[in-house]
Amino acid sequence: MHRILLVSKDQSLAKEISGVLPKGSKLTTSRSERADVLKGSEIVFLDMDSLPVHLIKEYSEQTFVIAVTDQERTGPVMEAATWGAYEIMRRPLRKERIERLLREMQDVSSEMESVITISKDLIAPAATCVIVGRSTLVMSLCEKVARIAQVEVPVLVTGETGTGKELVAEAIAQLSSRFGKPFVVINSAAMPDTLLESELFGYERGAFTGAVAAKEGMIKTADGGCLFFDEVGELPLSLQGKLLRFLQTQAFYPVGSTKEVQVNVRVISATNRDLAAMVREGKFREDLYHRLRVAAIHVPPLRERRKDIAPLVQCLFYRHAHTAQKSIKGVTKAFLDKLLTHDWPGNIRELENTLRSAIAICKTDYLTTQDLKDLGSHSTGIQRADALDAMATVLIPYVKSALEKKEKNIYEKVHAEVDRHVFEYMLSHTRENQSEAARLLGINRLTLRKKLGLQK
């Protein structure tokens, strides 16, 4: 039973709502402009057209608020959302939408019975850098980072997009003797080839059209510190030779200059590409590859270290929660569980953007699965999870029915029924080719025939 409070000075609205509420719902009405008349109501319908809109905030701090309006303008909708309304509905109210919304809010209420409050105390402080995680993989990564940081050698950091390669590079710089010195980032993919050389090495006045004054390059800016080449695999071949000479000598010539400039920098590179394969294809110089890869660190993808998702969520939530207009205390357990089922093709960057999106659209005190409706629309991992959920919606009622009938050997019956459907579909897929169906299933052909009752 839904306990609902309607706050309105319009008597016709009470009649309208009564006609669309599900059977068994209890409706109470109030004309008060004070938010102290809830009396145990689960949901508040607030009439924006007869009461001050700021009342939404007072009620929403205690329960769900559905703002109702008869106006055909976008302004009231945006205003109600700003004040914290869970949903905004235009009159006339439709029964099917009311029922859907009540079910959704009931699901959210149930989900919020198990929540994880995230506070600053949960985030471990660090004096220098933070690589968040508790998995064996990330622990090994941190150990390797700390050891390599102590030795003055070029480092190549590899890993998929969004795994945190730049964070690893920063950690190497901060844990080395160059802590506090310049850390200059060069995004090799974001800069046009025609500008890359002049930006990297600098140039003299008159070196080319538009060079009205001399400019110091990024390498010179990094003198004494670290130079980080992000997406180093995107460097044009024409520049790779010049970079190789710089790595050998720690010296270079600015564009248009005959005077050599000497610097002292540590070079760290990162790429999400297979540089060894690019070398074989002639797209990357082998000698430069070996110069950059004196020491190598691979950052594993997030799907291989799911144990790190929970601490990452805590850290990223704390970083971005303040951007929300309302106070958000944490996440529900169901929210976190859903994140754990995702494959994260975009890795930590995707996780961070997912949390930022959830924080932006959150309607309650905790992030819930309602804020993850767009999660994984391009991911195979969540599609597999959805398929398993769909299977469960069929199997579980069957099991419940069998229990009520006090049947025996329920597992064997379910297993046999699933096998039968899978095998029949596979035979249809292979056009009754039993050998091919057995091969795809990874079983013996005789086993397939036996399961289908074709062989005694």
Image: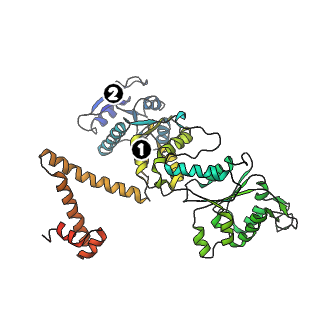
What residue sits right under mark 2 in the picture? 29
Residue 55 in picture, x, y percent from top left: 46, 29
State the residue at coordinates (74%, 64%): 247
Q: Which residue is mark 1?
A: 335
Residue nearer the viewer, 214 or 306: 306
Distance CA(mark 2)–CA(mark 1): 34 Å
Tell me where residue 192 sits by quadrant.
bottom right
At 58% across and 53% down in the image, what residue appears? 164
**What's the residue type where badge 2 is placed?**
Thr
Element under label 2?
Answer: strand
Work out whether residue 429 can be spotted.
no
Secondary structure beneath dot 1 equals helix
**Which-is-in-front pick, marks 2 and 1?**
1
Q: Earlier in the sequence, mark 2 or mark 1?
A: 2
Q: Relative to the observer, which residue lies in front, 181 or 86?
A: 181
Residue 406 appears in the figure = yes
Give the residue type that dot 1 points to: Phe
Residue 125 point in image, percent of width and height: 59, 37
When the figure is inspected, residue 45 is found, relative to residue 192, above or below; the finding is above
Q: Eyeballing the image, is 368 above or below 258? A: above
Q: Residues within 10 Å of mark 2 (few under 14, many from 20)?
A: some
Quadrant position of the C terminus in the picture: bottom left
